Each structure stands twice: as C-alpha cells, then as structure tokens.
Image (spheres, helix red, strand yellow):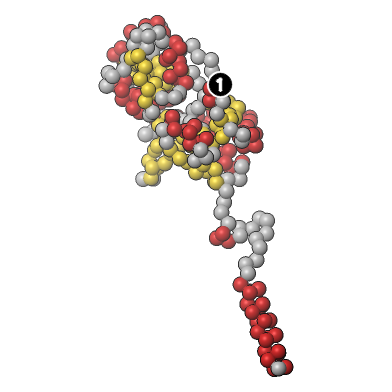
Amino acid sequence: MKKWGLTLIALVLSLSLIAACGQKPEAQPGESGGADAQKKTITLGTSADYPPYEFHKSIDGKDQIIGFDIMIAQEIAKDMGAELVVRDMKFDGLLPALQTGNVDMILSGMTPTEERKKSVDFSKTYYTAKQMIVVRAEDKEQYKTMESLTGKRIVVQKASIQETVAKEQIKDAKIKTLSKITDIVLELKNKNADAAIIELPVATSHVNKDKTIVIAEATPSVEEAGSAVAFKKGSQEMVDQANKTIDRLIAEKKIEQFVTEASNQVEAE
C-alpha cells in the first residue's frame, strides 16, 4: 500500500508539473503578448471619388486611397494609438454604416448640418471650402448669376450639402442626384445636365484635368459650415480625441500642407 501511495503522489506531482509547463506566461504591459495580441484598429468610412479630399490613385502599381482627408484620419488614428483601416463606399451609405457600427468614423468632406447632428456626433471643423457651379466650357457665358440657373437641370451628389443648395437657391431646378462625383461630371459632359454644384477644391481638381468643363461666375450664397469628422452618437471620448488632433494639425499648419500635397497628387495623375 505504501508503494502504491508513493506512486500515486509521484503521478500527481508529474501531472502538476506538466500542467504548469503548458501554461503561457501572462503578457506584461508594453509587451506584444504573442500571436494572441492584436493591435487596436479604427475603421474609416469614406467615399473615395472626391479629390483632393479622398480618391483612388495607382502608386507603385497598387491601387491606393489617398487625399487630405486620409492624411487627417491617419493622424487621428496615430494619436489614438490605433491602426487605420479605410473602407470605400457610396457617400449616402456612410451615415448608415456609422450608425450600424460598420465604420468607426467618417472623413469624406462631410458638412455637419443640423439634420446630420441629430443622428451622429461631429468633431470641430477641420476645413472650410466654398460651393461652386460647374458647367460646360461652351456654356460658360450663359451662367453668370444664380438667377440664370432658374429651371435648369442641376446634378449634385446624393445626400450632400450641394443638394440642399440646389433646392433652396435655384428656382424651379430640375435636380438629379448621383452617388459619385465622377458620375456627376460625366452627366454634365454628356449634356444630361446643365450644371453641377461641387465643392471648390473638388471642382478645381476636375476642371484642371478636363478643359471641356469650367467653374461658372454664378456662385451660391452658402454659409461656410466646412467639413468635420463624424462619429457614432454618444462617442464623446472619440470626438474629444479627434478635436485634439485637429487642434494640433491646425496649429502646425499641417492641414494646409495636406491640402496642397493632395492637390498636387491629383494634378500628377
């Protein structure tokens, strides 16, 4: 019995030692923790057809989404200690994606209107631009005032501030909404619309590349609300963190630098 007792004790000790050796040491703060540890990510929702804010460009044979919104998003993610993941989608799908948690934030030249503020939280404004009327070059002399657009076919981006401008400032406008800026420009060039309303830096990037379209003298009267970062409702901590990044970038004059760099990249296409 004694022999069996000693054997049993030895067996228990052996099993305990094996179990202890099989346990992974607990990761300490600052350590990677091995393959089980994952770096925090933040997913950006954007509509990458809006140069120089965000657009596709082939770099070293690889399609990439770049633009000054992307540069700002990268800075926000960096300050949050996270890796940025970019998701490209239609502009009118951005807010639903944010509300359902498919993206964590939106940078897409989005104006923080009172209507949008009901469903999402916004950072402070990081960039302000004017709205422009874009027409075919051959028709430029026809559109010197907003009144000259009365009853005309106006194409704008769906669910955008430009759609509101068309409804409120162009009498009897026949408004058509499309999701992508490239489609809006094509609609204008194909004479399926008389004019388009597009934000200044975006309009400039298109007319610089295509001499068949120009910015008209007619100019909407729009309160310059600018663009802001959108977050899911109730995300005040993320809003505060984004605001700190925006304050830093403005103080360092980095946003102006980003806009210039992105504009140069558009022109280099």
At 58% from the left and 45% from the top, the residue drawn is: 82
**Callout 1: few (<14), some (14-19), or many (20+) C-alpha neighbours within 10 Å?**
few
Of residues 143 and 118, which is closer to you in this image?
118
Query: From the image, which quarter does the N terminus lie in?
Result: bottom right
- From the top left corner, tell me how far across and down residue 263 is, in percent: 45, 29
Q: State whether residue 261 appears in this view.
A: no
Q: Residue furthest front?
A: 1
Q: Residue furthest left?
A: 190
Count of all numbered marks drawn on residues in the image: 1
At 56% from the left and 54% from the top, the residue drawn is: 38
Residue type (three-letter) at the residue carrying disc 1: Glu
Q: Quadrant of residue 201?
A: top left
- From the top left corner, tell me how far across and down residue 223 is, in percent: 53, 15
Q: Quadrant of residue 205?
A: top left
Picture layout, residue 42 above or below residue 140: below
Of residues 115 and 3, which is closer to you in this image?
3
Picture layout, residue 121 above or below residue 20: above
Picture layout, residue 116 above or below residue 172: below
Of residues 99 and 52, which is closer to you in this image?
99
At 42% from the left and 41% from the top, the residue drawn is: 64
At 53% from the left and 22% from the top, the residue drawn is: 115
Q: Is residue 23 left or right of residue 51?
A: right
Picture layout, residue 9 above or below residue 114: below
Of residues 61 and 45, which is closer to you in this image?
45
Q: Is residue 166 left or right of residue 249?
A: left
Query: From the image, which quarter does the C terminus lie in?
Result: top left
Q: Which residue is mark 1?
A: 114
Q: Secondary structure at mark 1?
A: helix
- From the top left corner, tell me how far across and down residue 7 is, in percent: 67, 89
